[in-house]
Image (spheres, helix red, strand yellow):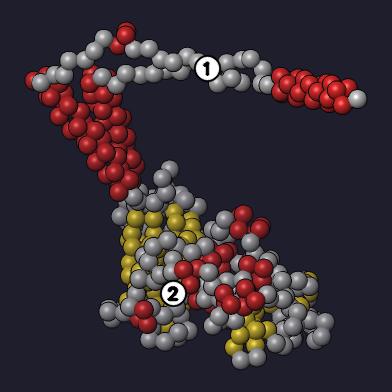
Amino acid sequence: GNWKKFQLTARVEMAVKDNDSNAEVTNEPVETSVRQQKVNAWFPILDPVWFIATLFAMGAICIPTGFKIKSISNNVVEMSQIYDSFDMDLPCKITKANENNLCSVTFTVENDMKPPIMVYYEIDNFYQNHRQYKESRDDFQLLGSLTQNQVGQRRCEPLNKLGNITLNPCGMIANTLFNDVISLQSGQDSDGENLTLIEDGIAWQSDLDYMFKQPDTFRYEECDCNDCTCDQPDWSCTNGTRYEDSITGKCYKYFYPNDDSTQYLYETYPKIINPIEGVQNEHFAVWMRVAAFPKFRKLYGYFDRSIKKGEIITFNIDANWIVHTFKGSKALVLSSSSIFGGKNPQLGNIFYIVGIIFVSIGFLFAIKQIFNPRKLGNPKYLKYKKN
């Protein structure tokens, strides 16, 4: 009886093993060069001649490329003028925030400029890249949330609340927004027509679509400027504070939730932010994309028409953003552009330097190979493992 049981057990184990072996064969990859990783490969032999030729070839590519890039950069017309600095006495200098110091900056165009012609503000010695600064924001709040979790509150401190008033948006980035108002006083294009400073389309569209939303339940509607009733609690504005668009002349009434206990962006920066756009204002979106270095430029606007050499362009500035507290400076920059952006001679210089290094090393190896060559073995005796 025990012998029969043993035979039966052995037969079952053999059947299981047969099934396992069949499963392994079934799951085995197809016998092809790609599936079995047997694709033919090139095994170059880097003898001195090939190596020296490669160095010279790389130098021959990099040096002309650097010359072309630098030529393109040199064709960019760029003018910059500092209008406020902690260590300079300038007409636009301010000593306290929101001083509303009115001044002007004038440029005389040095060479013909082709559109688009960018208008930047440049700030020096301001560290937007500081970890605590760049993390000081509540992304859920910027997307319209009216509630904050503990992480958002902690990140926004100490600019989360002012007493019992909640800041929306909170954090250091949003509440240090560059709020100098720059406008064009005079200037003409190459056809003699008055220029217009365009301030739309300066932010990344993806930022406006996916990173900034007005608060939940926010709403607005157009109304008659002569009869615009916007009484509380249905509307946040009163008859005296309805918003009128200076460009279109249209009037709007609007509603912000919890307006009595919250200070919104348009209330913090009324000269830059209007209540209809709020956090979707493009100047705000540009500012919220923090810079990597302490000296940086951000786009304020642009011209879409050509400007001739010798043209005088004057900007009016309402100076409010203070720099002397961090020993910094502010400048206005007028620049044409290229395929590589603004003027950037360093990029061409990098290609020059790398190309020269390649050629120099190739030249040294060539001298060594000529005067003191190394005898190589016959490569035909090299064998590569195929399996």
Check residue 319 in the rendering and tell me which mark sits there, or answer none: none
Which residue type does callout 1 highlight? Val
Residue at the (39%, 18%) spot, across then down: 43
* Residue appearing at x 17%, y 15% in the figure: 375
- Which of 163/281 is in front? 163
User: Considering the numbered disc 1 on the image, is that residue within a helix, a strand or a loop?
Assistant: loop
In this view of the protein, which residue sits in the foreground, 368 or 172? Answer: 368
In this picture, residue 338 sits left or right of residue 50: right
The relative height of residue 329 versus residue 293 in the rendered view (above or below) is: below
Residue position marked by numbered label 2 in the rendering: 317
The 10 Å Cα crowd at callout 1, few under 14, some 14 to 19, many 20 or more, is few
Circle 2: element type:
strand
On the image, the x and y values in percent for residue 359 come to 21, 31
Judge left or right: residue 236 versus residue 288: right
Compared to residue 276, the image places residue 241 above or below, namely: below
Give me the disc on residue 39. Answer: 1
Q: What crowding class fits label 2: few (fewer than 14 Cα within 10 Å), some (14-19), or many (20 or more)?
A: many
49 versus 163 height, above or below: above
Q: Earlier in the sequence, mark 2 or mark 1?
A: 1
Q: Is residue 247 visible?
A: no
Q: Give the image quarter of residue 72.
A: top left
Residue occupying the point 30% across, 55% down:
110
- The residue under label 2 is which amino acid type? Ile
Q: Is residue 115 left or right of residue 343?
A: right
Q: Position of residue 228 (x, y in %)?
A: 78, 80
Write the residue at 48% across / 84% down: 98
